[in-house]
Amino acid sequence: MAMTASDRARKNRALQKFIAKRYQRRKIVNGLAYLAIGIATLTALVPLFSVSEFILRKGLPGLNWDFFTGLPQPVGEPGSGMANSIVGTAILVLLGSLIGLPWGIAIGIYLAEYGRGRAAGIVRFSVDMLSSVPSIIVGLFVYTAIVVPMKQFSAFSGGVALGILMIPTIARSSEELLKLVPQHIREAGLALGLPRWKVVLQIVLRGSMSGIITAVILAIARVAGETAPLLFTAFNNRFWHDGLGQPISSLPVQIYTYAISPYDEWHRQAWAAALVLVVFVFAVNLGARTIFRNKTKGSHV
């Protein structure tokens, strides 16, 4: 029996009503989901802004020209600063990068390009375990392996400790980034007659360099605030460093030393140093995010 015009109109109205009801329900669910995401985001941002505001409020009064140019002085003496600690932190991070960067990238290349079977599994497991080892354990290891035989604390041992802490982050990030390079690019290089090692270094590694730089910057941001391993390796120094074989000052250790003292003046300087360290880590992380964002945009062009 043929459907009349009135039946078709009634059926269309019922269908439109059903669609409108489903659409309204989806809008409500979507709005609730956005609300939950917003609440979760605010919950995550509250500690960040609270800590940042607290450090700014405590640290800004202690910042002055002497802080960036002077050396630590006894309590009550004018011109006290942390110039040696700022320079010492830069030296330790540079040493750690020189030690951890080549090893981390080499391990990442091995795992991504050559690592197969049980050997690669052992290396990958070791890297994962190293990333979960507390930093103070790394400091104790370097203390036993380098400080005790040398019979003194040194900037070199501190750089070794930071370098070891950087290796897992760089290695795993490099491995994942190298795996993202399409296989046909490797095959194209081999088809041109290039040896395997040249394909890896000149094509695959170069194509992943932006992401690897991001991983390196994040690793630097992580070790820049480490205190525990430096207490057992670089120790501290009230003066300018005198070679890599001597103790060296650093911001994290100086903050710890001043924070446990009973003097308000040293407490103010500790907060100022904490602010400088936080700003440094924030700038490094911001730079890493910017590089990563530019790399992502470039991949869509």
Image (cartoon, helix red, strand yellow):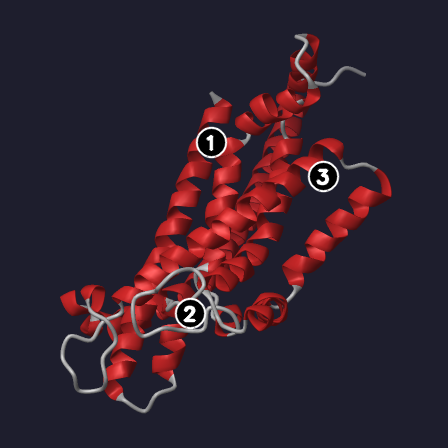
* Disc 3: CA contacts within 10 A as few (<14), some (14-19) or many (>=20): many
Which label's residue is closer to the chain start, 2 or 1? 2
Question: Residue 270's x, y, as percent?
Answer: 31, 76
Q: Mark 2 or mark 3: which is in front?
A: 2
Q: Nearer the viewer, residue 6 or 32?
A: 32
Q: Nearer the viewer, residue 95 or 65?
A: 95
Q: Amino acid at mark 2?
A: Pro
Question: Residue 83's x, y, as percent?
Answer: 26, 65
| Mark 2 vs 1: CB contact within 8 A | no
Which residue is denoted by mark 3 in the rendering? 111
* Disc 2: CA contacts within 10 A as few (<14), some (14-19) or many (>=20): many
Q: Mark 1 or mark 3: which is in front?
A: 3
Look at the image and tell me in which quarter the N terminus lies: top right
Q: Amino acid at mark 1?
A: Lys
Q: Which mark is residue 36?
A: none
- Relative to 23, is 76 above or below? below
Which residue is denoted by mark 2 in the rendering? 247
Residue at position x 42%, y 69% from top? Answer: 247
Q: Amino acid at mark 3?
A: Leu
* Disc 1: CA contacts within 10 A as few (<14), some (14-19) or many (>=20): some
- Relative to 59, is 296 above or below? above
Q: Secondary structure at mark 1?
A: helix
Residue at position x 61%, y 68% from top? Answer: 134
Q: Which mark is residue 295?
A: 1
- Relative to 140, is 10 above or below? above
134 to the left or right of 213: right
Residue at position x 42%, y 50% from top? Answer: 285
211 to the left or right of 46: right
Q: Residue furthest front?
A: 150
Q: Secondary structure at mark 2?
A: loop
